[in-house]
Amino acid sequence: MPKPKPPASAPVTDLGLESLQVRREAIFLVIAQVPEGCVITYGDVARLAGLGRSARLVGRILSQLPEGTRLPWHRVIAAAGRISLPIGTVSGNEQRARLRAEGVRIHNDRVDIRRHGWPTGEQS
DNA sequence: GCAAGGGCCTGTG
DNA sequence: CCACAGGCCCTTG
């Protein structure tokens, strides 16, 4: 049958709404694995999480993170090592402060991705 | 339910 | 730096 109709009685294992959750979890796991002093781009996070080109989704998810999260969201930056969060904002300031605290040098809203990029860096 | 606009994006020109 | 298009999701009307 090309059209599996779910019973209106008990759609317990319902995909679709849940897959959103799954994506968030995947993103969470990927970012959680970024080592200290390293950065990763939105695109790479999406790719490693199996989301393909949904870098924008990653940004959206990150923007909606709870305050007390242990997720190192500050290690997630835009492509080419650019920091997309504007300076002067709480998040932007926090991100820069944390990165610098981890030894990441920031020069004009830019991070040396060749040095701190992950996983394609040389931290091994 | 569809169209339009916007957002921590990305790549090309 | 700006403009466009490609992809994903949310909010409005």
Image (cartoon, coloured by chain):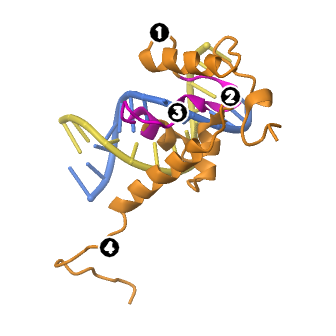
Chain colours: A orange, B blue, C yellow
Classed neighbour count for the residue bearing mark 2: other residues with Cα under 10 Å, few (<14), some (14–19), many (≥20): some
Classed neighbour count for the residue bearing mark 3: other residues with Cα under 10 Å, few (<14), some (14–19), many (≥20): many
Q: Which of the pair A7/A91 is nearer the observer?
A: A91
State which mark lies toward you, 4 or 3.
3
On what subunit does the disc labeled 4 rest?
A
Q: Which of the pair A54/A93 is nearer the observer?
A: A93
Q: Which residue is mark 2?
A: A37
Q: Is residue B12 above or below residue A82?
A: below
Residue sticking out furthest to the bottom: A1
Classed neighbour count for the residue bearing mark 4: other residues with Cα under 10 Å, few (<14), some (14–19), many (≥20): few
Task: Based on the picture, tell me whether residue A74 belongs to the magenta stretch.
Answer: yes
Pointer 2 or 3: first along the chain: 2
Q: Which residue is mark 3?
A: A73
Q: Are marks 3 and 1 in contact (CB under 8 Å)?
A: no
Q: In the displayed structure, does residue A30 sit left or right of residue A104?
A: left
Percent across and percent down for residue A104 are: 69, 21
Q: Which of the pair C8/A109 is nearer the observer?
A: A109
State which mark lies toward you, 2 or 1.
2
* Residue at x 56% of width, y 15% of height: A97
On what subunit does the disc labeled 1 rest?
A
Query: Which numbered circle lies on residue A30?
Result: none
Query: Which numbered circle lies on residue A88?
Result: 1
Q: Amino acid at mark 2?
A: Gly
